[in-house]
Image (spheres, rainbow, N blue to C red):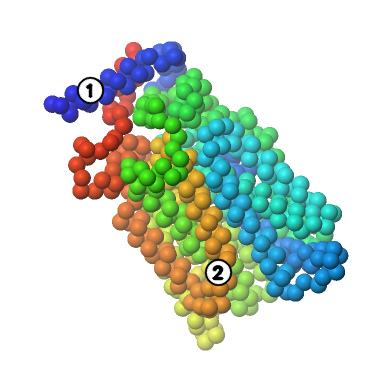
Amino acid sequence: MIQGFCKDLNRSAVIFLLKNTKYNFRLAMSHVGVDKKGNDLNLMLMVTSCAIGGTLQYGYNLAIMNAPTIFIQNFVNETFRERWDVQLKNYQVTLVWTCIVSIYSLGGLAGALIAGPMSITFGRKKTMLLNNIFLMLSSLLALTSRAAKSFEMIIISRVLVGINAGISMNVQPMYFGESAPKHLRGAASLSSAIFTAFGVVLGQVVGLREILGSEPCWQYLLASNAIPGLIQLLTLPWFPESPRYLLIDRGDKEACINALRRLRGCEVQRSELDEILQEQAEAKGLRPSRPWELFADRNVRWQVISIITLSSAMQLCGNDSIYFYAYYVFKESGISPDMIQYITICTGTCEFTACIICNLLIERQGRKILLMGGYVLMTGWAIVFTIALCFEHMVEWMPYLSMACIFTYILSFGMGPAGVTGVLPTEIFSQTARPAAYMIAGSMMWINLFIMGMIFPFLVSELGEFCFVPFAAVCFLSALYVGLVLPETKGKTLSAIANEFHKLNYRGQDKQGLPAPQAQYQLGEVCHSTAL
């Protein structure tokens, strides 16, 4: 009886809160539909506009650095000789080149750390637009570096474009997850991975010697990332801000309903608005969390552990390293060096195709099966790849098996970890904790990307053909974690997902003793209580 009384009291408090807001909610609710079907075209256009200048940049700026390697190294050597009459040794040139490449990760880490405060202060859409400032400065420095005879400008350019990628990798999935309806939330967030893979393919194509990958054009190749950013600046302002941000963070109900109507292409459905209202009621009076506060909050302990584990595994699984190893494997398979650049495009296309397939399956099969299945398959292919490398000089057809393992490994990564990992922070954290959660996830991703870039050459030199054994172990442990710990989030509300994690966060304890501020009521009742 006491529990029933408390439940009714919570429901009454929420109703009272909604009735006494500044905005007359009855007028707003007159625009709410019940069963009308919308047109998802506006949502698709918004996703495309945002992603072209967002996560596409991450993949693109990774890929375009492969083609001009020799040209930039020669440029560094010539600069030292003209300035100080010093001829650099090979290891010194390699050291400068490693700095140019690796500094991108440190810029990404800085971008991930400022993405949360920016998304809270300016909103999701404005943050993506302001993010192009870093991109345009980066392109300008890269374009003029050759004329200025300054390799330092290239290093600063890579830092700035890393900041751009770090911000977009965090804010874009947040923007998509908050703007999409529940049944498309996973597919919309997963589109970030699709555009990342497309950016890799686009960078590989633009980096061909016949296009911009030649010695006279390498500065234009580095500056070409300004074109997608310009497209975003021209198109994204036509689309609305995240509806959840407008209602929960800004308290603007009219703007929220208008944003929903524009994104859905129809009148707002009652059930969707109910869900956002419930999240607003739960976040009432709470300020946005800081990253260190999430570490100390037992209510989100396993959510934080999950994003740290899976964001780290995404970089430690060896997918980026297998791109590096691909040149060696293709050469051993008898492919001429002139043709390897074209075969390499197939690896990027492979991941791009896999991400599209994952996008089609995520709302049918769920997050957990795709994530766990991807890591299980990667474990198996890493083992087969190791065996193929061990016997490549003994069995004639083993190099072809190695080549097949490269494509299947990348396919397995694209089918699960590449896309699903970025969806999780949107679905397992509340509105107030989401920016901080993305800061943690993004930081772990960029830190581990930097670590992998530094230690992989040593893994190759020390372990030889067994260099992928550590990656197989990471993939196996990640699959085990997903299978045993991570709950399925497909089609569930934030409250339902939070209840799943409560069982982990307070295992063995009575839930009546939990400090749970969430308001508990059935979806739809609030709308009925406002004299709809």
Q: Which quadrant of the structure image shows residue 492?
A: top left
In screen coordinates, is 51 left or right of 312? right
Mark nearer the N terminus (1 vs 2): 1
Residue beneath disc 1: 8
Residue farthest to the left, as pictured: 1
Say the numbered circle drawn on residue 456: 2
Give the residue displayed 36% in from the left and 37% down from the top: 494
Give the residue displayed 41% in from the left and 68% down from the top: 473
Q: Position of residue 328 (x, y in %)?
A: 61, 74
Give the residue displayed 82% in from the left and 70% down from the top: 86
In this orientation, which residue lies closer to the viewer: 244 or 294? 294
Compared with residue 429, is residue 331 higher up or lower down, i.e. above or below? below
Q: Which quadrant of the structure image shows residue 521?
A: top left
Mark 1 secondary-structure assignment = helix
Q: Residues within 10 Å of mark 1 (few under 14, many from 20)?
A: some
* Quarter of the image that includes the N terminus: top left
Q: Position of residue 14 (x, y in %)?
A: 32, 22
- Type of the residue with mark 2: Phe
* Quarter of the image that includes the C terminus: top left
